[in-house]
Image: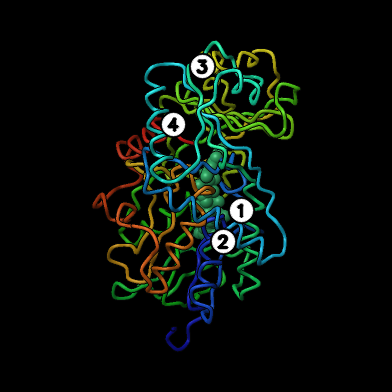
Amino acid sequence: MSPAGATADVLVVGGGILGCSAAWHLTRLCPTARIVVLERHGSVATQASSQAAALLTRARPGAVVVMPLVARTFAAMDELADELAQPLPLHRNGTLHAAGSAAAVGEQQALAATCAEHGLRAESLDLAEACRLVPWLNAAAVRSALLMPDDAFIDPYLLADAYARAARRRGARFRFGTEVTSINVEADRVTGVATAEGELHAPVVVLAAGTWANRLAAPLGAGLPMAPVRSQYWLTETDPLFPRAHPAVLLPEARAYTRPELGALLFGVREPASISVDPAALPADTSGYAFADDPDGWASLEEGAPSLRRFLPALDRVAIRRYVAGFSTYTPDSLFVIGEMPGTRGLFVASGCCGAGIAASGGFGEAVASLVAGETPPFDLAPFHPGRFGPVDPSAPAFRASCAAARSRKTAG
Ligand SMILES: Cc1cc2nc3c(=O)[nH]c(=O)nc-3n(C[C@H](O)[C@H](O)[C@H](O)COP(=O)(O)OP(=O)(O)OC[C@H]3O[C@@H](n4cnc5c(N)ncnc54)[C@H](O)[C@@H]3O)c2cc1C
C-alpha cells in the first residue's frame, strides 16, 4: 500500500474518540496496513471526548442521515465487547422526551414518526408513568411523554479506550506526546506529517484532530466547514430525586437534556446564542478552558433556569457540584464533516461532530476507514462532504456565528 520509505500506511492525527474509532475500523478493513495514531497528549481522549455527557440518542428527526452512524456505534460496542472479552459499561436507561407546549408536542410526534419509519422502539407514556420513571419531573408542565427505551449513555473515556485497545490488539500503534505541526503535501497528494521530532511519511492521513483540525487544514488553503462552539453541562449533588437508573430526559422547550450520574443529575442547557471561539486562538489543552464571557457558566444557567425550572422544580433546591464546559465542532447545517479533503488526495477528515461524536463514533470510524480502503462506505456520505459549502474561512465571525446557531437550534440529545 505504501511507497518505499513510508513510516506507515495510514497516519491518524488525534487520539480522541474519532481517531480511536477510525484506527479500529482501519485495522479491520485494512488488516495488513501499518496504522499509527499520533496524539500530542499523554493518553487517548483527554479533550472533548472525556468531557462529553455521552448521550447515545438514536432518533434524530432533524438529521436522519446521522442515524445509521449512531446505529453503527451500538453495533460496534457489541463487537468491542466480544473482541476485548469484556462488556462495555453501557447504561441502557432509555430517553424520555417531555413536551409541554403544542409546538413541542408536534416535535414529539415527528420524533415518534421517525422512530416508526426507522424501526426504533418508542412508547407513549401516560404522565403518571413518566413521573414514576423520572421522579423529579413536574407533571403539571408536561402534556405528552415519549420513551425511547433503547437509547443509552456511556462513560465516553471508556468507549474511546475500548476502540483504542481493540485497535492495538489488531496491530495499530499509538504514539503519545507527538504533536503534529503540519500536514505535508506534494502535488496535491498527502505525503505525511511533520512533528517536533521529525517527519513521518505515509500516503494517507486521517485528520481527526477535533477542535484543532482547522489549525492543520488552514496552511493547505482548505478551511473545514466547522467552528468550535461551547458545550456545557452542570452536575448536582446526589439526591433521592435522581435514581441511578432513570432515563435521560430531553426537554426541547428548555433547550435542555438531563441524565443520571451516580445518584446526581447531569443537565445541559443550550444557550439561545451559543458561544463560538476562533479556532486559531485555542490552546492545545482545552480542559478547564475559561470562556471570556461567562467563565463559570452562571450567566448562562440563570438565563436558562426559568424554562428548566418549569420541568425541574428542584433546580432551586439542589446544590450544583460542578460545571463542565468544552468544545464541540459545529457546522452551519448540523451535519458532520467526513470525507477526502477537496484538492488534497489521501487526506481524509473525520470531524465536525456537532455535539454527537460519541453517539456517532462507530459510524465516523467505519465511514472514514471505508474511504481509505477504497470500499463503498456503508452510509450515504454526500451530506457530510468537507467541500459542501465551497471555500470557507472558519475564523470569520459570520461563519462562526452560523455554526454557533446550529448548536442553539439543536433539540436532539
Ligand atoms: C460538554 C460536552 C458535552 C457533550 N455531550 C455529548 C453527548 O451527550 N453525546 C455525544 O455524542 N457527544 C457529546 N459531546 C461531543 C463529543 O465530546 C465530541 O463529539 C467528541 O469527543 C469528538 O471527538 P474528537 O475525537 O473529534 O475530539 P477530541 O476528543 O477533542 O480529540 C481530538 C484529539 O486530537 C488531538 N490533537 C489535536 N491536534 C493535534 C496535533 N496537532 N497533533 C496531535 N494531536 C492533536 C487532541 O489532543 C485530541 O486528543 C459533548 C462535548 C462536550 C464538550
Marks 2 and 1 in Cβ contact (< 8 Å): yes
Callout 2: helix, strand or loop? helix
Q: Earlier in the sequence, mark 3 or mark 1?
A: 1
**Can residue 150 be seen at all in this image of the molecule?**
yes
Q: On the image, numbered disc 1 is attached to which residue?
A: 45
- Which residue is painted at 55% across and 21% down in the image? 126
Q: Label 3 amino acid? A: Val
Q: Which residue is mark 2?
A: 20
Dot 1 amino acid type: Ala
Asked whether disc 3 touches disc 2, contact meaning CB atoms under 8 Å apart, the reply is: no
Structural crowding at the residue carrying mark 4, measured as other residues with C-alpha within 10 Å and reported as few (<14), some (14–19) or many (≥20): some
Mark 3 → mark 2, Cα distance in angstroms = 40 Å
Residue labelled with disc 4 = 411
Query: Is residue 198 depicted above or below 126 in this figure?
Result: below
Assess mark 1: CB under 8 A from ligand 1?
Answer: yes
Which residue position is annotated with label 3? Answer: 142
Structural distance between the alpha carbons of marks 3 and 1: 38 Å
In this rendering, position of residue 392 left or right of residue 171? left
User: Marks 2/1: CA distance?
Assistant: 9 Å
Query: Neighbour class for label 3 at 10 Å: few (<14), some, many (≥20)?
Result: many
- Label 1 packing within 10 angstroms: few (<14), some (14-19), many (20+): many
Q: Amino acid at mark 2?
A: Cys
Is the residue marked 2 within 8 Å of ligand 1, measured from its CB? yes
- Mark with earlier residue (4, 2): 2
Q: Nearer the viewer, mark 4 or mark 1?
A: 4
Q: Residues within 10 Å of mark 2 (few under 14, many from 20)?
A: many
Front residue of this view, candidates 136 and 328: 136
